[in-house]
Image (cartoon, rainbow, N blue to C red):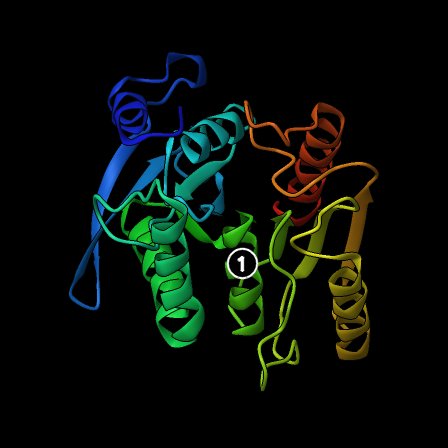
Amino acid sequence: MRGLVSLILLLTVPTAAIGAAGSAVTYQVNGGSYEGYYVSPSKQAPLVLLIHDWDGLTDYEVKRADMLAVLGYAVFAADLFGAGIRPTEVTDKRQHTGELYKNREKLRALMQGALDAAKAKGANVANAVAGGYCFGGAAVLELARSGADLKGFATFHGGLKTPEGQSYANTRGKIVIMHGSADTAITMDDFAQLAKELEAAGVAHEMITYGGAQHAFTVFGEDRYQEIADKKSWKRFQEFLADELK
């Protein structure tokens, strides 16, 4: 279950396996209250800014954060919807993501606010990569286009279209796209168009497709979960982090 109850349990139970307990972090962005999740195995561990799917920050992102902490990374899982807002109905999910898609400045401010909150917790934001799933992947590309001073940006089955009037001219880090070629929500035409844009902008990038993988292929327990694509993309993400974060 990707629900609030599971999230609360994961936030409050120490993660002994990583030698550090993750915890909920309440922070403010432009007067709004948000609740992220932070875990770090050491003071100067490289940072991963993790951006959630369209159902908000749930136990899925917490689990991914803890998996990364085992590997030696600090992780700040951002909250882009607001404290306590974890939509479960499709209409609500579309509402919350749609509001941010229509207000790109707010979306950027929320991600910067998450980075600021991570820094306040002692995270090394000068040695950081952003990664995201589905809606979070689209948000990560928004962060890349904003010119954020991060070392890399990675997306798992994320939205790939560039809003009208935007470009990758200011992107400062390498981009890695991990995409299912059987994804009908985000098509291979979208994938190809992004490749053309990144090449034209001179952005260092790598774009990978996984045969037979549908949208949301990394989400444990879902009908569309594909273990092979999940394991391969997770391995590539680990390699990316090792290459970009020193």
Taking the view exactly as shown, the residue that stands out farthest to the bottom is 165
Q: Is residue 175 above or below residue 2?
A: below
Q: Is residue 152 above or below residue 86?
A: below
Up-down relation of residue 170 to residue 128 (above or below): below
Q: Residue at x 77, y 44 (%)?
A: 182
The quarter holding residue 150 reads: bottom right
Q: Which of these two is toward me, 121 or 215?
A: 215
Residue closer to the observer: 184 or 71: 184
- Place of residue 239 in the rendered image (x, y in percent of width and height, measured from the top left): 72, 38
Q: Name the residue at the top extreme.
A: 16
Residue position for label 1: 140
**The N terminus sits in image quarter:** top left
In the displayed structure, does residue 118 sit left or right of residue 158? Answer: left
Task: Specify the amino acid type for callout 1.
Answer: Val
Relative horizontal placement of residue 29, taking residue 125 as reference (left or right)? left
Badge 1 element: helix
Horizontal side of residue 49 vs 79, given as left or right: right
Residue 195 occupies which quadrant of the picture? bottom right
